[in-house]
Image: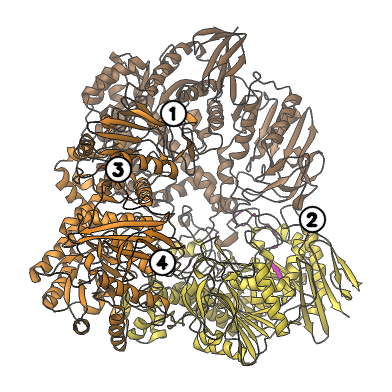
Chain colours: A orange, B brown, C yellow
């Protein structure tokens, strides 16, 4: 298969020349060369320009753009343009429009207005894909195929009648018999027992709470349906273009939750993702680092592509401030630190009209003469210098488990608390370890856990028997396993494991929980030792474990909040609540020390460190997120500044160093 | 009519054996006996198990369950299973699905997905009822019929075309002529005058505020429609089973407001209700006590059945903490104190799947070996010991008025304030009296008020002339009548009584209000004497009354906030605002003292006392809602502990005593 | 054209006699005479009384009301009654019902339930208008025609299929070619390029953000569509009644934003408007003054009619307190101070039923014997005494620009911040100037700016080249032009002006902004000199200007926040943020002093002053909004008290003086 181009970190972004007059294209080439752009993604939203009316194709402009890019030495990640249908298509076939939970038709006028189950849409999209693959498979600019775009960002879940039919077929495939489905969904309750497949519907707006397993299966169905669509496009391209890698851009961001990327990853020739910083989060950069590690986990530890991020402000938040000076470089290098070998942005030139005109770009509204474009050029130069890092890997002794099925199930209807969010526990643990210079892998529960010294199981509400056994085995084999509140509660059908919570981990932890006491929003509970718990508490009884911390007030006063149990060569820790940062940080430090997990290096608060290692050496990424200068103890050659450093190095505010360690 | 079984307080709950394998049923019998269960409600959601496809009936499993229960000495409250249709039914007849205010079809997949006006659904439901009544009317386990379940919990109001037709018929019945309807609805305004019955619609989503009397009538229509349905089912059962009492479970909870239970009560052979504690309330246990008293009022002072409550957490709140240890017993005995002679729970065994799997039960997920199940067994034993209380009554000298029509009207569109809630004033007065050991009846304004020394009229926005006259007569006859803000404003057509507020009570109070000054959320106004008012204020002028308290700031500075007037042998008090707890508590103490109303006994804060009295003696219920031990002055035999107590008794935290007084 | 009647300020309001029995009408006449009512608006919601079934007309009651009013010397502003169709009409033609953004049909049962694009509705409405015009054009009571009522208050935007067709026609008119439309809307992005007019839809509910220019054009289309309807009614009336002025009541309130009244104004024989005070605003009376000035601007500086306001509480807010005593007079005279020559109220007699029964009126529920009615009578007497003010004008040296198109564009989807509101900047500047006794005109950017010494351009996000040039010319000619943050960003197609913000004013200000840093809700940023900015900040670079204030913290630390530049004979000021009241107030004082703008007179905080001037003299309006007595320095004759005052005058709390200056 053809290699992804470049001697440095590939650097570029979405290029939408159809938005601009032809004269601008030449200016674009000049500025791309100036900025050091090595690749662009072309054609993501071009269907209406490639096929302006049904069956009438206009590829000439794309030919010209491809040729121009090639002439300028810029590789092309060519999109299949099937992410969004043109107006004529939805006008001719309104039945492909998605329908929301309440039964509202989602009209065109935005993007991705198509039903994921529509065979008709798939046929039309595959026809365009076929034409593109046939025409461009041997174009010299072509370096990668980019199927569709951000699958499911807006059109999942769809609740239309087409989806209802497809859902039934998916269920018949999954369950084979109605008895099996009735058992899995628990339809004995609320008179929901099905006696004909035809009676089954999507979990549409109903009178009160929907059936939770039906909702969970609808998540699975949605993800599987789009994956099948992706695979169909992949297959069409592969037929024409066997040597060029194919990908689709994931969205590994905490606020995108529709696809189970662990299912999707095996079908990517290379993992690529989009990530945007969410300003409203308490810890936006910790979220970035977490999802970088998650993406690396999806890539099986191999390097991955950051297909899209932003140089500065986005346009879809309630308030969208620009990034501080230096922020473009800092955020980008954080992704590289976590394993990215490509830095793509949305988009090359900031639009002057349309829905994304206030989304930042490589070339801002202010133009070439602007600090942001100068920072872009700086980043391009850095990317070129980072070539030696390519293909190196990030090693971690700690695994934080992440599972989209557990996320879906925990977000279902009528749970003990809707005030808690699946991501809180994994994000918090990851952030506190990152603050201490400890790198984590973020992996699926089914991953090989044998190589980790610490395995964190954060609110893994739903878990299979196999995965629970693998987690227990890790402890027996010597790892420190930390299981937090509300883990191991249900099986993959979302049936509660009976006999005391957390069913799947009761024996491992030596703890038996009788009832849940979720904490109200903003409620905290005092813990022995001076800490405070939030989010959750539960009435745990020690069966065979040592009590580390107890509740110090309230209905659980004196009951265990944190316990530990020796198991085989390892240790199983239980957290029944989410301790405050200080308490949990201390606990994690203690566990790390016991487990022999070392920080990458000692860091000041707000400084992030990650090491990438290769056959030829290692590179220390140091990311100064603070607005103060920071002194580091490091010796080697800094690829960012291009200078040797050591034994100490002063790092400017909001800047980064990538030191090839001596 | 057959008597409700048992020597003690009947104890049990909903039993859904169809959720579990047959082997579990035997285990259920063992545990029921262990827990002291005397009855179960069977079949509430069993339609899809009784008639899995149209016209195919499978009663065998129910036969077996009935026999098994009978063999174990457990009485059955048999549900008609018509609360929720099976999937095949809504699939075959989608026209029975309800439609919400915005026009959204409410699909099946939850429960109660049927239009209240559907004749078709009624026919299908009555057919099943008929089969059940015919088959089980002489089964020896049968002790009661349980029609449907929690009517209107989810399917009212429905705005479908079937309802539109039914609404017109209901209106024609009510008004006879369009002139009368036009007058009642005030259609002279906003060009709403009707000249054909066919033009009338439900108050569906419209451009801005709906007609308030149309909305009020739609509430009435909904309640009447379901009552007619209930009566049809009742009639079918009665034909087959003349000796067995029939009931349906009300929902006398402050957050359920769709049915006028004062209309429904006369058609119950025994009043039964469901009550769940709402964690988010400021005073959840005071709400419980209030609605116990309301249920007793619906039962005309006679004992009633608590058909459902929860042993611990529910699953439908945003956050659902478990009850503290002791809470199951304490909440149950609070209901008994207020007149319940039956303690039912939802449900026997906690589901492992489906929408209510995190709703607590008599047998929790943790199983037999759990503190909660041990508390359940303790409650079963206590219930058995409480047999001597059966049939005794609660006597009150204070009446708090409650009217669902006033509630509906006050909750209507475009009112002076949507920041006030009908329940606030009655709940507050009731709670402050309860804190002082004073028991209230909660009764409809049309109740016989002559036996009360104090009558509280809390924000009775809408009132009929007859009821207003009856309230005034109570004062003339010697009672202290307390009328709060925003009472007596409109008549049953929701026409404002002109000439100065509160029209219906202006003469009684000797006060004339010119304008309303509702207070903003969180706004308070200083009162003379140091108190503070919240919720509401109004520009009152004294015509013939004594000023007790005035406003001490703001636009009403110096105007009367509280007045009193001697009238006949009694006194009429007026409250233009809601004073803070301390001020209002003092006022209520003063009124009680003047009226000669004695507390049941002196209590510490957080301890609730109620007396039930019978021909053979009296029982003092003492409920310690605090987390501290409390010393009581009481002598007699405590049925809870089974021991003699006196002259003082130490009551453990969160526990109760029921002392047969010597 | 016939003159609007009266020797004093015309005084009256909406009169809906059809709500009341005939006997009340005579009582109404007595009370109108007592109150000094000189005019009423009749028939606003009378369609169902004028045409109770299709083609059956019942004008007799209206004849009688007209005659009765005439006999009592009261002029009639006769409504065409087309604001709200009767039930029979929407029942017969349900296709005229509007449809909301999500596709919900908006049913009748409220008011204005008709689609603005419906030709059918227009025909039916014009037929009624024709009959009314033919019948009453020469009635002696007739003084004005009142077309429809509060256009667009509830039925805009409508998204139905009829509107889709009309929108396409409107677009074809505007753009002529699809290429022009595609360019204006920026459809090159997100595959939105149109190749057939038939594919275009209203911006209905879609998957994510709608196209902003499509949304903007839909605002324009809605306003234009209703204006065409208004003009059709106007034309029908004019044909029958050439001598009687025609108007429709605008709603110049900050929370009504659907119509571009600058487009509508030229088609009014006299500008009339409705204004209601919004209790939840931080500065409700400043909002009133602002919109009075805006209305005067719409009237080209000529006097205008306040068609509706309220004597006291309204009924459509979450909480609706009554006005304080004196508030009726004070609010009314504030409008007169700003140029109103008519004081109309909604409505004459407070309804006893229907949706507006808790909306205050001239005759309250409490009746004639009430303080509010006595205040109404006082206002009537004052109005009569104010005759000498009629026709006088308000002169201002300061213009604040206001543009509904800029408002619409700035409120569009996916902007840099949805936490800022178009009205904040103009309201704040106007309020701070008002607090300092300085009167502003509020005018469209295309107004003649040459007569102003200060021109404020507050967040004028969208601006045409012509208007931007006119603003710059004002500075060159000597004015102080103050341009605030987020002005001049886009052109009338909402295309961003490239090369650095604020494109349209970059040269004028000598400032170039590279990026936006909108501030989060409740976020503030320190400024040099001790002030604080809120709402917004931006990364500005001085090209040719003097830095007045800089940011003192955060990512923009040290960057300019306020600058000034000499330009021609004038000065261009730039504000990149919204300074706190104290800082901005000082700045405005400085600018006023530099510009030679004098306050009307010196005032204490909370006292508002405006001067009206005529050929015969001038009148100082002094409005004491405080609850304290205020001493004024003024000499002349006070028309409110009817007494001579001077050289000082004590003004009671919440009261007004109108002093004919000596």
Q: Position of residue B333 (x, y in %)?
A: 50, 21
- View extreme (front): residue: A647
Q: Quadrant of residue B13?
A: top left
- Boundaries of the magenta span: C343-358
In terms of secondary structure, where does tag 4 sit? helix
Category of crowding for the residue at label 1, using alpha-carbon neighbours closer than 10 angstroms: few (below 14), some (14–19), many (at least 20):
many
Tell which of C299 and C530 is nearer to you: C530
Residues packed near mark 3 inside 10 Å, few (<14), some (14 to 19) or many (20 plus): many
Q: Nearer the viewer, residue C617 or C272?
A: C617
Instruction: Please name which of the two marks, 4 or 3, marks the residue nearer to the observer.
Output: 3
Q: Are marks 1 and 2 on the same chain?
A: no
Where is mark 3, residue-wise?
A456
Q: CA distance from mark 1 to mark 2?
A: 53 Å
Q: Chain of mark 1?
A: B
Q: Is residue B473 visible?
A: no
Residue A353 appears left or right of A240: right
Q: Which residue is mark 2?
A: C371
Residue A411 at x, y = what percent? Answer: 34, 46
| Residue C343 seen | yes
**What residue does disc 4 label?**
C95
Determine which residue is flagged by label 1: B309
Q: Nearer the viewer, residue B304 or A439?
A: A439
């Amino acid at each position: 298969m053809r290699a992804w181009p470049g001697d440095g970190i590939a650097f570029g972004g979405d290029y939408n020349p159809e938005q601009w007059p032809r004269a601008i294209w030449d200016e674009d080439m000049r500025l791309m060369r100036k900025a050091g752009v090595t690749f662009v993604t072309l054609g993501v939203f071009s269907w209406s320009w490639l096929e302006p009316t049904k069956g009438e194709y206009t590829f000439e402009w794309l030919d010209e753009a491809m040729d121009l890019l090639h002439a300028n030495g810029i590789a092309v990640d060519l999109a299949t343009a099937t992410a969004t249908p043109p107006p004529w298509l939805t006008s001719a076939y309104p039945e492909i429009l998605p329908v929301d939970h309440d039964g509202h038709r989602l009209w065109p006028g935005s993007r991705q207005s198509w039903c994921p189950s529509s065979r008709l849409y798939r046929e039309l999209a595959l026809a365009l894909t076929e034409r593109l693959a046939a025409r461009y498979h041997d174009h010299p600019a072509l370096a990668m195929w980019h199927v569709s775009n951000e699958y499911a960002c807006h059109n999942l879940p769809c609740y239309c009648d087409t989806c209802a039919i497809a859902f039934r077929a998916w269920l018949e495939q999954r369950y084979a018999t109605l008895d099996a489905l009735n058992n899995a969904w628990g339809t004995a309750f609320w008179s929901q027992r099905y006696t004909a497949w035809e009676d089954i519907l999507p979990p549409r707006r109903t009178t009160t709470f929907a059936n939770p397993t039906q909702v969970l299966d609808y998540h699975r169905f949605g993800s599987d349906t789009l994956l099948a669509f992706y695979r169909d496009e992949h297959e069409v391209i592969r037929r024409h273009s066997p040597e060029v890698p194919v990908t689709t851009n994931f969205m590994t961001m905490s606020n995108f939750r529709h696809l189970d990327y662990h299912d999707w990853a095996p079908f990517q020739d290379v993992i690529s993702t989009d990530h945007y910083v969410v300003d409203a989060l308490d810890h936006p950069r910790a979220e970035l680092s977490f999802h970088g590690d998650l993406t690396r986990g999806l890539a099986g530890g191999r390097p991955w592509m950051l297909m899209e991020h932003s140089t500065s402000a986005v346009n879809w938040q309630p308030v969208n401030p620009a990034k501080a000076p230096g922020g473009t470089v800092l955020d980008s290098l954080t992704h590289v630190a976590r394993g990215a070998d490509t830095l793509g942005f949305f988009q090359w030139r900031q639009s002057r009209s349309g829905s994304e005109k206030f989304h930042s770009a490589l070339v801002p509204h202010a133009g070439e003469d602007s600090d942001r474009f100068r920072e872009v050029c700086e980043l391009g130069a850095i990317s070129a210098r980072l070539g030696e890092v390519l293909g190196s890997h990030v090693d971690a002794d700690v695994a934080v488990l992440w599972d989209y099925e557990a996320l879906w199930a925990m977000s279902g209807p009528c749970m003990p608390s809707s005030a808690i969010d699946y991501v809180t526990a994994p994000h918090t643990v990851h952030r506190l370890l990152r603050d201490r210079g400890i790198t984590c892998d973020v992996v699926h529960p089914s991953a090989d856990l044998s190589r980790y010294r610490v395995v964190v199981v954060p609110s893994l509400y739903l878990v299979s028997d196999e995965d629970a056994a693998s987690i227990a085995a890790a402890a027996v084999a010597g790892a420190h396993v930390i299981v937090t509140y509300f883990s191991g509660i249900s099986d993959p059908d979302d049936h509660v494991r009976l006999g005391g919570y957390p069913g799947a981990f009761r024996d491992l932890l030596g703890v038996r929980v009788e009832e849940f006491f979720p904490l109200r929003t903003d409620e905290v509970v005092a813990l022995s030792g001076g800490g405070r718990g939030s989010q959750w508490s539960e009435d745990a009884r020690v069966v065979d474990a040592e009590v580390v911390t107890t509740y110090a007030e309230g209905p659980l006063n004196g009951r265990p909040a944190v316990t530990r149990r020796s198991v085989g060569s390892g240790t199983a820790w239980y957290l029944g609540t989410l301790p405050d940062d200080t308490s949990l940080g201390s606990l994690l430090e203690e566990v790390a020390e016991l487990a022999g997990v070392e920080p990458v290096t000692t860091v000041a608060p707000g400084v992030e460190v990650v090491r990438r290692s290769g056959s030829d050496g290692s590179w220390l990424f140091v990311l100064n997120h603070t607005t103060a200068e920071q002194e580091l103890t490091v010796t080697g050659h800094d690829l960012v500044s291009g200078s040797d450093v050591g034994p100490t190095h002063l790092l400017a505010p909001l800047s980064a160093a990538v030191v090839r360690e001596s």
